[in-house]
Image: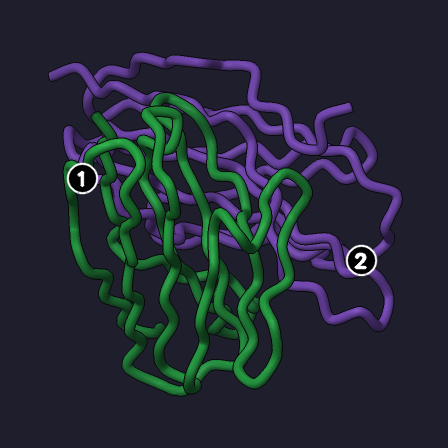
Chain colours: A green, B purple
Amino acid sequence: SAVISQKPSRDICQRGTSLTIQCQVDSQVTMMFWYRQQPGQSLTLIATANQGSEATYESGFVIDKFPISRPNLTFSTLTVSNMSPEDSSIYLCSVVGGQSYEQYFGPGTRLTVT
Amino acid sequence: AQKITQTQPGMFVQEKEAVTLDCTYDTSDQSYGLFWYKQPSSGEMIFLIYQGSYDEQNATEGRYSLNFQKARKSANLVISASQLGDSAMYFCAMREDHSGAGSYQLTFGKGTKLSVIP
């Protein structure tokens, strides 16, 4: 399984500001995913990030609010822009791997917006 | 309609006992995969077990087994010999393999909070 790290692990931010979350994988992967988990809720897919192409966003998520970069096969960033308290969530990146194409997740970034 | 339904918001189990966490799913695809993940309070998502729609045998992985009943569209997780460290949120998820699309996206249920009592 891939080893995935995320930075920062947690942050407290003021409303109206932006935060960029980094996701680093220890091996080259084609697909990376970004999820949001609001307090007490399940995971919701924000977007799929493939290297060399624009990210594909799910319904309800837009590029202006959640711009994503994927400069190479081991790294991606997610920016949460113009934050509001409703953006307080855990943000997780994941990659596909293994015999069953299961997804492996990073440790998550806990974001609190005040 | 929800694609993954977990009807038990919370469950309690005595240490060393077995527990079953329920999951039903809804898909029109013939080919799909079902997954269970564990999320401790630390927030990380830990992959536990996988069942493919064409797998005839129930998946097992150590103390975890998946009770797959295809006709009923259920994929319940069974944890044997519960340990205190099993206390966590458990999420059922599905990947629908739209023919030829190579989709690896997962749809998650709302989760079940398992508490193991000493």
Chain containing mark 2 = B
Q: Quadrant of residue A38?
A: top left
Residue at 46 percent across and 25 percent down: it is B20
Q: Quadrant of residue B74?
A: top right
Which residue is the site of mark 2? B31
Residue at 47 percent across and 52 percent down: it is A66
Q: Residues within 10 Å of mark 2 (few under 14, many from 20)?
A: some
Left of A44 or right of it: where is A108?
A: left
Residue B57, can we see it? no
Nearer to me, B75 or A32: A32
Give the residue type that dot 2 points to.
Answer: Ser
A105 is higher (above) or lower (below) than A75: above
- Report the disc number at residue B42: 1
Q: Residue furthest front?
A: A16
Say which label, 1 or 2, has the lower sequence index: 2
Q: Secondary structure at mark 1?
A: loop
Residues beneath discs 1 and 2 located on the same chain: yes
Chain containing mark 1 = B
Give the residue type that dot 1 points to.
Answer: Ser
Q: Residues within 10 Å of mark 1 (few under 14, many from 20)?
A: few
Residue A45 x, y percent position in the rendering? 55, 47
Residue at 36 percent across and 66 percent down: it is A77
Residue A91 x, y percent position in the rendering? 35, 46
A87 is higher (above) or lower (below) than A26: above
- In the rendered image, the quadrant that contains the C terminus of chain B is top left
B12 is higher (above) or lower (below) than A101: above
Residue at 27 percent across and 32 percent down: it is A15
Q: CA distance from mark 1 to mark 2?
A: 33 Å
